[in-house]
Amino acid sequence: MSVVFERTKLLTDKTFHYCPGCNHGIIHRLVAESIEELEKEGVIEEGKVIGVAPVGCSVFAYDYFNCDMYEAAHGRAPAVATGAKRVVGKDTLVFTYQGDGDLASIGTAEIVHAAHRGEHICTIFVNNAIYGMTGGQMAPTTLVGQKTTTSPKGRDEAWCGAPIRVAEMLSTIPGAYYIERCAVNNNANIMKTKKAIKKAFTYQMQGKGFCLIEVLSTCPTNWGLSPIEAMKWLEENMIPYYPLGVKKDKEAE
Amino acid sequence: MAKTLMKGSEAIAEAAIRAGARYFFGYPITPQTEIPEYMSARMFDPDVNGCFLQAESEVAAINMIYGAAGTGARAITSSSSPGISLKQEGISYCAGAMLPCVILNVMRGGPGLGNIQASQGDYFQAVKGGGNGDYHLLTYAPSSVQEAVDIMMFAYDKAEQYRIPVLFIADGIIAQMMEPVEMPEMVDFKIDPEKKPWACTGWKPGDDPEKRGVINSIYIDTESLSEHNAVLQAMYAEVTKNEQMWENYNCEGAEYIITAFGTVARIAKSAIDQLKAEGINVGLVRPITVWPFPYKAVADAVNADGVKAVLDVELNEGQMIEDVKIAVNGAKPIDFFGHCGSQMPTTDEIVAKIKSMKEGK
């Protein structure tokens, strides 16, 4: 019998704590598989990987990614990654893995300035339009009308603004090298997400500059939907507001 | 070795480099901006070959320290009081993750924006808390440029020995004045993964699981957080046992004991000399580590025969005096003299205060 499939070595065998239907599992696997494949392709040297995950649902990512890992303060992962990258240099892949409550709210200064400096790090930005870990509060990315525990009547644009489009915003910063928005709602988009992650990691190893992959993701628990309904909600509500695609790629310009 | 006249901030920055610091992250704020300015040039000299990066905020700077220190490098940040307040979140994380690093606070007047003159108003913040949780920083309060330089030369060794962040609290005078300094030789520091198995120095599946770098301060269940805090407290007990530093000045046969730290202690010494010439014998106990506080050293000096009372002098409204009270534990009366608003207590004021105590006022 030959082995036809096995779990990527870049994930530990620790059981995920994520809720049923949550997309973090898919995205973790895409990140880990991308690293392993790039190691096999000789783009990344084995054992030269540092991940940084701040406060949020992925706060325990250090238990799941099988490499050197940091747990960072809420929103501060790009600063922590900056400090690490400035020491370890071009031969080590440094990535952050951040949610939308983290990156698009408390961590806006850190992500904007990491992009502004053209910091040689990659950010995997998981956008599910809500605060997951604290139990479903309104995020800067929450859609207008979307009900959360702190917008019980639905997000009111007149009161608290319209949701922020992080990928588009960061793509206006001269220091950003490659920015793409993806989703993991179907197989085709999952494959596109993995391709984008591998491209971002490859750019970093080539010394190109700051890369961010925004991944639209579901939160069935806090959206109050079944996993399948959540995927449908993402397609019908999030993708129209957060259009998928490459927002910036200096390589292609 | 010849002494050179150097500004405090630049001497401290140079000493940090000579002690092996190669990563500086900071943000401009008076009265310590000369430190990042110095670092921004010196770090790129061929004999240093380090990294200076101006962060977008103090919040980011301390988190860059967290990132750099987590790889095992010797990293440093500096700021002044309001900026140090912004760093408290990251300092607590560094303490929780047991990251060796050095943080400089050139204290200015507060609260809030306060002013840009010298102050000792951050004593409480430095030794009684600052950030959240049960932690301490090995905290030095130098009273001269040379002392700051000398302490810097072993600060990283202590930080790495115990895995504790080191904090310097220097009032603005120390950073701004020029003094003759003897600058030590450059140490040869390299990141050694064997000495820092906890650091992110490169790990792959199949390597010793104990050596995977996991820089972390979250322990979600009650048992593991209790265990982690027990490790921290055991370490703090060791630091308390081994690392207390203080200076006694003219304590032999003293009638009064002054307690003071930093620049104020130097003024107190001048007052003591003046009083001695007038036949009044006064001693000084100057804590050099303010955490761990040298409780026994203060108690020993105060409990000596002939000591009538204690005078605590500070450039604030009375903060270290709380530790002095713990040390003295009611054995002798304790009086206080201090200023806020960054008006430095003068020799004459301290002399007058001791005389009024002697007169029973």
Image: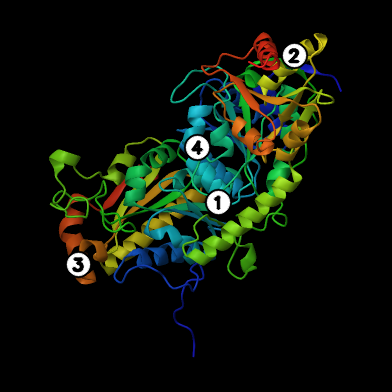
Question: Dot 2 corresponds to which residue?
Answer: B270
* Image depth: mark 2 or mark 4 in front: 2
Q: Give the amino acid at mark 3.
A: Leu
**Mark 2–mark 3 distance (CA, rounded to whole Å):** 75 Å
Q: Position of residue B166 (x, y in %)?
A: 64, 40
* Image depth: mark 4 or mark 3 in front: 4
Question: Dot 3 corresponds to which residue?
Answer: A225
Instruction: Classify mark 2: helix, strand or loop.
Output: helix
Q: Give the amino acid at mark 1.
A: Gly
Chain of the residue that carries numbered disc 3 in the rendered image = A
Q: Position of residue B358 (x, y in %)?
A: 71, 16
Q: Are marks 2 and 3 on the same chain?
A: no
Query: In the picture shown, does residue B68 fall above or below A117?
Result: below
Q: Are marks 2 and 4 on the same chain?
A: yes
**Mark 4–mark 1 distance (CA, rounded to whole Å):** 14 Å
**Mark 1–mark 3 distance (CA, rounded to whole Å):** 38 Å
**Mark 2–mark 4 distance (CA, rounded to whole Å):** 36 Å
Which quadrant of the rendered structure holds the C terminus of chain B?
A: top right
Instruction: Classify mark 3: helix, strand or loop.
Output: loop
Question: Dot 4 corresponds to which residue?
Answer: B87
Q: Earlier in the sequence, mark 4 or mark 1?
A: 4
Q: Give the amino acid at mark 4.
A: Lys
Chain of the residue that carries numbered disc 4 in the rendered image = B
